Amino acid sequence: MQQVTVIGAGTMGNGIAHVFAMNDYKVSLVDISEEALAKAMATIEKNLDRMLKKERITAEQKSATLNNITTYTAMDKGVSGSFLVVEAATEQTELKLKIFKQMDELADANAILATNTSSISITQIAAVTNRPEQVIGMHFMNPVPVMKLVEVIRGYATSDEVCNTVMDISRKLSKVPVEVNDYPGFVANRILMPMINEAIITLFEGVAGVEEIDTVMKLGMAHPMGPLQLADFIGLDVCLSILNVLYEGFGNPKYAPCPLLVNMVTAGKKGVKTGEGFYKYVPGSKEIVVADNFKK
């Protein structure tokens, strides 16, 4: 019960691996790219160094955390012996279904298969496996080492035992698990994404500028980050994918993505990850400025 696997070494995957490893789990981190794995380990070490500098961990804890993680490019070796496999790949339905078919074939028969999806149906994902009762959503928030919430999503067939186990594991990670049912967007993104989309529509219609919209929400609603900056942080492509899931799932026009969001993603302006979205971002700098297209 101490061996877990994380599939995907991106932002969410390396954060999930970090948290499990820091809580004494042995972690197999799997990705098809050696470069992605090396980048993930560098990110984890950088985040641990930040915690060490703030005296939240000791040098021994940093070393133990890093030693608890082993990287693999072969999924069969990566999932072997794990009681829990957490998929943290890109938010694309077909990709996740493909990965879950592989996970089901290769993981131990009693292993729980979890997905970090933020919007895709757990029931749909479970349906491609031969163990739907052992499939569950385990939606961590970004940045994973900092954010306390884990949205635990039950699919149609998820067993009580599996749900209770994942809730307990989340608590052992010093997280706060919240159990929700399997509907498009679950709770977090069903509420968050329409707000972000409405902020983009407000900009699109010329009601106010980027900084003005974010300032209203930060100072007027006590949000730590404005919705447009948050969209950049999440990734505009991810926001678009989630809104499409909501729109297709409910068939309600209120979830239709703003044309401005669609155009920005098509143009490759995806937020922090590409260096520009509603704001411009310089690597290594905390300073951000409004993107040229939105300057007055």
Image: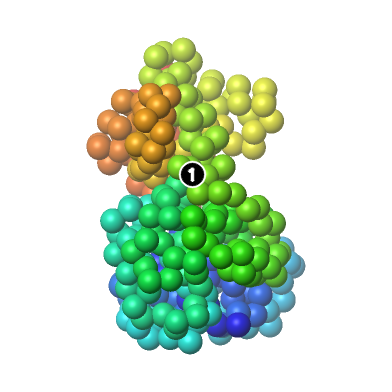
Q: What residue occupies the far right of the structure in this picture?
A: 55
Q: Nearer the viewer, residue 20 or 121?
A: 121
**Amino acid type of the residue that numbered disc 1 sits on in the rendered structure:** Tyr
What residue lies at 62% left-to-right and 69% top-to-bottom? 161
The correct choice, above or below, for 234 with respect to 291 in the image is below
Q: Quadrant of the N terminus?
A: bottom right
What residue lies at 49% left-to-right and 44% top-to-bottom? 183
Q: What residue occupies the far left of the structure in this picture?
A: 266
Q: Position of residue 33 (x, y in %)?
A: 31, 72
Residue 111 visible in the shown view: yes
Q: Position of residue 83 (x, y in %)?
A: 53, 80
Label 1 sits on a secondary structure element that is loop
What residue lies at 67% left-to-right and 26% top-to-bottom? 221
Quadrant of res 184: top left
What residue lies at 39% left-to-right and 45% top-to-bottom? 238
In the image: residue 166, left or right of residue 104: right
> Where does label 1 land, which residue?
183
The correct choice, above or below, for 185 with respect to 35 in the image is above
Quadrant of res 109: bottom left
In the image: residue 153, left or right of residue 149: left
Q: Crowding near pointer 1: few (<14 within 10 Å), some, many (20+)?
A: some
